[in-house]
């Protein structure tokens, strides 16, 4: 299994005769079962549980996993904010398709919009800090401190 699973959690429910995988929503853990893929060893007439039989089973199992993983992409939505794969129940879609988010990210977005004290909810006011400006070179260099609260300037000694 070279491919990373589409969701963070999946279950392999394969048997010796069939391959099947269950992928779970990253938010609510709702299961989505893959198709059932049959193990086809009849045409090779291999003895049961021989190394060649096990190698063939592993190869077909890996192929079935790849197919199931690719098909699961259609059952889950990728949230552009948190990068989780969620089921349709846990995904909030809009008509413009630009603001499609998982339910959790959508709620967080609503909180930011409803409680923003400034025009942009994600910006926070910086604490005022004094700034030191250097003027001149070498021995003639002077430092001017600008008080952030009053915007008044003076030499470093005077403040």
Image (cartoon, helix red, strand yellow):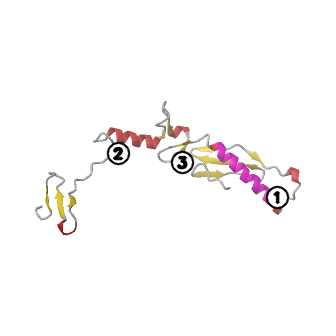
CA gap, disc 2 and disc 1 = 58 Å
Q: Position of residue 25 (x, y in %)?
A: 56, 45
**Residue 122 — which label?**
2
In the picture of the structure, the residue carrying the numbered disc 3 is 26
Question: Residue 35 sits in which quadrant?
Answer: top right
Q: Position of residue 136 (x, y in %)?
A: 20, 62
Q: Residues within 10 Å of mark 1 (few under 14, many from 20)?
A: some
N-terminal of the pair, mark 3 or mark 2, is 3
Q: Residues within 10 Å of mark 3 (few under 14, many from 20)?
A: some
Q: Are marks 3 and 2 in contact (CB under 8 Å)?
A: no
Q: Main secondary structure of the magenta part?
A: helix
- Examine the rendering and report whether any part of residue 49 can be seen: no
Closer to the eye: label 3 or 2: 2
CA gap, disc 1 and disc 3 = 35 Å
The residue furthest bottom is 139
In terms of secondary structure, where does tag 1 sit?
helix
Question: Residue 109 sits in which quadrant?
Answer: top left
- Examine the rendering and report whether any part of residue 73 can be seen: yes
Left or right placement of residue 81 versus residue 56 in this view: left
The residue stretch that appears in magenta: 55-71
Left or right placement of residue 91 versus residue 132 in this view: right
N-terminal of the pair, mark 2 or mark 1, is 1
**Residue 53 — which label?**
1
**Residue 39 — which label?**
none
In terms of secondary structure, where does tag 2 sit?
loop
Quadrant of image for the C terminus = bottom left
């Amino acid at each position: 299994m070279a491919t990373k699973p589409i969701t963070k959690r999946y279950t392999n429910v394969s048997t010796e005769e069939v391959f099947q995988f269950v992928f779970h929503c990253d938010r609510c853990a709702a299961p989505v079962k893959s198709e059932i893929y049959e193990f086809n060893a009849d045409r090779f007439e291999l003895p049961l549980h021989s190394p060649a039989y096990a190698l063939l089973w592993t190869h077909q199992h890996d192929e079935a996993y790849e197919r199931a993983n690719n098909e699961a992409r259609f059952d889950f939505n990728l949230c552009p904010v948190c990068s989780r794969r969620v089921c349709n129940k846990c995904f909030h879609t809009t008509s413009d398709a630009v603001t499609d988010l998982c339910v959790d990210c959508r709620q967080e977005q609503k909180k930011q919009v409803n409680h923003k004290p400034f025009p942009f909810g994600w910006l926070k006011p910086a604490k005022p800090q004094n700034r030191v400006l250097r003027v001149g070179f070498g021995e003639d260099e002077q430092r001017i401190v600008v008080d952030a609260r009053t915007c008044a300037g003076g030499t470093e000694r005077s403040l």
